[in-house]
Amino acid sequence: MRRRNKDNINGLIFASPWLIGFIVFTVVPIILSLYYSFTNFNIFQKPSFVGLNNYIQLFQDDNFYKSMLNTGYITIIGVPLNIIFGLLMAMLLNSKVKGQSIFRTIYFIPSIVPIVACSILWMWIYNAKNGLINVILDKLNLYQPGWLVDPKFTKVSLLIIGIWACGMTMVVFLAALQDVPKSLYEAAKIDGANRIHKFFYITLPVISPVIFFQVIIGIIAALQYFTQAYVMLSTDSYTLASGGPENSMLFYAISIFYNAFQYLEMGKASAMAWILFIVSTIITLCVFKSSKKWVFYGGGD
């Protein structure tokens, strides 16, 4: 018993740097943000309690709803697209073809490019006058969209970047596909199953836990969508605290950033952060609950 207590104490001592850091840099800020969400606080003055006023103001703010719609768009459309393209790429690269490792490397490279560098690269490609895409479209006498200046195309531009950088999703699916037992495919072949049957009745059920993982990770990342849009909004074309043409790139996380560090309304920004936390929790719980119907675990009940 004494030895066990001694081991526990030693364990706590070795883990104490992480525990102290977690409490100071994570738990305390979370508790403070909840308090600030009920106050009027601009960093330089003491916070003054205003009750639910920040939340009431948010629900009367058009930009709040616009940022939610933009974030919902990138979540509802972007997450499935990323998963579908990641899975398709993984299936192609799982085929036994010559130069397989080279193709895998080429398709994975975009996912290791820093997000800021990736965003600047795509700003050049999307340039309405001399960008790569519009130059090609011009040569083909096709319509040339204003990718980053036309509100109809701004979010589509961001979706394309997300698909281009789906290498990490592809790698996870590739590992999952290689774990699918070959004996299942051989048994299905004997029963006369074609490729479509094998995909829907063997591949998808076996890799469903990985799909579930990608859905959860994708939703959480999409609800916090920030860097790509913020880099593009920081060009000379827009003023600070802009959401792009018709606020079409004003995402929820960007709106929190503007309220906190442009307008110095920390109370309002904290209220937005807590609303995002509640929405994220509800969506995640719904996905977890629905997973009982479409996720199959090997050896589970």
Image: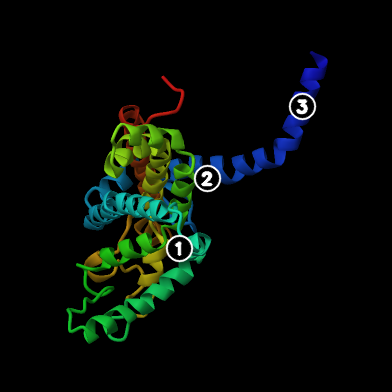
Residue contact between numbered discs 2 and 1, judged by CB atoms under 8 Å? no
Quarter occupied by residue 274: top left
Residue contact between numbered discs 2 and 3, judged by CB atoms under 8 Å? no
The residue positioned 27% from the left and 82% from the top of the image is 136
The residue positioned 31% from the left and 35% from the top of the image is 201
Q: Is residue 151 left or right of residue 159?
A: left
Provide residue 127's location: percent of width, then percent of height: 32, 80
Cα separation, mark 2 vs mark 3, equals 27 Å
In terms of depth relative to the viewer, which is nearer, 236 or 46?
236
Pointer 1: what residue?
107
Q: Which of marks 2 and 1 is in front?
A: 1
Residue 110 visible from this viewpoint: yes
Pointer 3: what residue?
9
Q: Is residue 48 left or right of residue 52?
A: right
Classify 100 as above or below 145: above
The residue positioned 35% from the left and 67% from the top of the image is 241
Quarter occupied by residue 257: bottom left
Classify 80 as above or below 164: above
Provide residue 34's location: percent of width, then percent of height: 44, 41
Q: Which of marks 1 and 3 is in front?
A: 1
Q: What element carries label 3?
A: helix
Q: Is mark 1 on a helix, strand or loop?
A: helix
In terms of depth relative to the viewer, which is nearer, 242 or 298?
298
| Amino acid type shown at disc 1 | Tyr
Residue at the farthest front position: 190
Pointer 2: what residue?
29
Q: Which of marks 2 and 3 is in front?
A: 3
Provide residue 152's location: percent of width, then percent of height: 19, 67
Q: Is mark 2 on a helix, strand or loop?
A: helix
Badge 2 crowding class, 10 Å Cα cut-off, few under 14, some 14 to 19, many 20 or more, is few
Residue 50 visible from this viewpoint: no
